[in-house]
Image (spheres, rainbow, N blue to C red):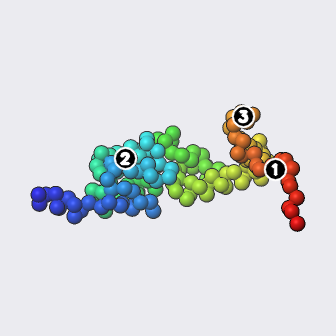
Amino acid sequence: MKQENKQDENFRHIVRVTNTDLKGEKQLHMALHKIKGISFMFSNFICHASKVDPKKKAGDLTEEEVSRLEDVIKNPAKYDCPTWLVNRRKDYETGQDMHLINTDLDLSEDADIKRMKKVKSYKGLRHTWGLTVRGQRTKANFRKNKGKVSLGVVKKAAD
């Protein structure tokens, strides 16, 4: 009984990792999915590189374990992360392999789309026109992306 009370005192229902709230009830490797830019494989890599049990509940993490997790997330190359696992290989500006999360991922994606539009590449033109970019057929699907075109007759308002 006393053992359970001690566990409850140390247990946190919300754990803050890289500016994201993680549910403490979930296993660590599943809770890390909540962070934008972290996939199943990358979360397993984070757990093994930081030497934290992936099956451990996120609420049972100590501050030292959280700091190790954040260090692995921010610097995966320091822990010999394979290049196929990172989400930004051969960055346009730096030429380095890096892994982006949260707002950095959104900003880089927006910058890539703006660059494609500016140089008027095929993908950039498709983005500009609001059409599909990756070769999907558009005859039946993607009707909502084509924009609102009003058709039909508009009645005059009664005076």
Crowding at mark 3 (Cα within 10 Å: few <14, some 14-19, many 20+)? few
Callout 1: SS: loop
Position in image of residue 14 (x %, y %) = 35, 61
Residue assigned mark 3: 140
Residue 136 seen in the current view = yes
| Quadrant, the N terminus | bottom left
Say which of marks 1 and 2 sits in front: 1
Say which of marks 2 and 3 sits in front: 3
Question: Which amino acid, by three-letter code, is at mark 1?
Answer: Ser
Q: Are marks 1 and 2 in contact (CB under 8 Å)?
A: no
Question: Which amino acid, by three-letter code, is at mark 3?
Answer: Ala
Q: Quadrant of residue 71?
A: bottom left
Callout 2: SS: helix
Identify which residue is drawn at 36% across, 60% down. Answer: 15
149 vs 56, left or right, is right
153 vs 79, left or right, is right
- Cα separation between marks 1 and 2: 49 Å
* View extreme (left): residue: 1
Question: Which amino acid, by three-letter code, is at mark 2?
Answer: His
Callout 3: SS: loop
- Cα separation between marks 3 and 1: 19 Å
Position in image of residue 141 (x %, y %) = 69, 37
Q: Which mark is residue 6?
A: none
Position in image of residue 17 (x %, y %) = 40, 59
Which residue is nearer to you in this view: 31 or 17? Answer: 31
Identify which residue is drawn at 72% across, 34% down. Answer: 140
Earlier-in-chain disc, 1 versus 2: 2
Position in image of residue 51 (x %, y %) = 31, 49
Q: Which mark is residue 150?
A: 1
Q: Which mark is residue 29?
A: 2
